[in-house]
Image: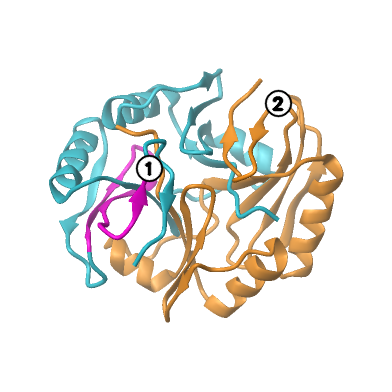
Chain colours: A cyan, B orange
């Protein structure tokens, strides 16, 4: 089977609020939107922002928590870019969960929660390769 | 900024149990592992399985819920493949959350929870393109 993820779908309370955060914070444009979901075309997969009741209905699993045991990461090219992106996300309605610092395993990273408390790690990792299309390759 | 996600990190209780589920269920091999995390090299991003206390410590946000308001999707080439993958995941320790059926927006999909209750949508969507490297492109 392909080692492939097609979509990350996150549950959100307010589509307009989420569009502002992802549009103004990350600068991303949706590829599709309707009254209950919008998608970003990412690096070989989609990020979907889906109204939480609709996600619960689609999954057949009501009363989902937010702020669950996962994080999404967006890697950038330098420590300075980590700080700049985190500040831009905070200005767009995000919340700094952990200010950026250097973990023991190397690199530099912090965490920002989106308006629904989904955590984004903003990271610089000099050992990882990111090509022009945003495709990421593991390195040590 | 690139429309790019570098990592999806999920919190897990038991690394061996998760390796069994992802290894036997999806047939995936880790690119890196140590005593608290392992990574799969996916289609231009990583999937990380990180011990939940370690993720909480790294994020600086304790007592994370699991089963949160998000899902991960793996798209396959046919309705029959959706059923086959879901059965294989269930045999590897997953739980069928929603048996596969056809949603109003088209295609065919069901949901399986991994051993830590992270939801995977297994889907067939004939309008979406998936290339040989697993890179997914939106279509209607």
> Residue drawn at (72%, 41%), measured in percent from left and top?
B123
Q: CA distance from mark 1 to mark 2?
A: 26 Å
* Quarter assignment of residue A91: top left
Left or right placement of residue A101 versus residue B82 in this view: left
Q: Nearer the viewer, residue B4 or A13?
A: B4
Q: Residues within 10 Å of mark 2 (few under 14, many from 20)?
A: few
Q: Which residue is mark 1?
A: A131
Which quadrant: the N terminus of chain B? top left
> Residue drawn at (69%, 64%), measured in percent from left and top?
B27
Q: Residue B138: x and y, percent? A: 59, 27
Which quadrant: the C terminus of chain B? top right
> Which region shows up in magenta?
A107-130
Direction right: furthest residue: B80
Which mark is nearer the camera, 1 or 2?
Answer: 1
Subunit ID for the residue under disc 2: B
Q: Which residue is mark 2?
A: B127
Q: Residue A115: x and y, percent? A: 34, 37
Q: Residues within 10 Å of mark 1 (few under 14, many from 20)?
A: few
């Amino acid at each position: 089977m392909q080692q492939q993820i097609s979509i990350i779908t996150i549950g959100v309370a307010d589509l307009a609020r989420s569009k502002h955060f992802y549009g103004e914070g990350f600068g991303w444009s949706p590829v599709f939107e309707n009254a209950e979901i919008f998608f970003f075309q990412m690096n070989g997969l989609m990020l979907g922002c889906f109204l939480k009741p609709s996600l619960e209905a689609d999954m057949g699993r009501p009363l989902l928590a937010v702020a669950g045991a996962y994080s999404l990461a967006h890697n950038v090219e330098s420590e300075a870019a980590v700080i700049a992106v985190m500040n831009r996300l905070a200005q767009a309605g995000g919340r700094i969960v952990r200010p950026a610092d250097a973990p023991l395993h190397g690199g530099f990273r912090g965490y920002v929660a989106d308006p629904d408390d989904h955590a984004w790690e903003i990271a610089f990792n000099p050992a990882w390769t990111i090509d022009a299309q945003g495709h990421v390759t593991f390195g040590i």
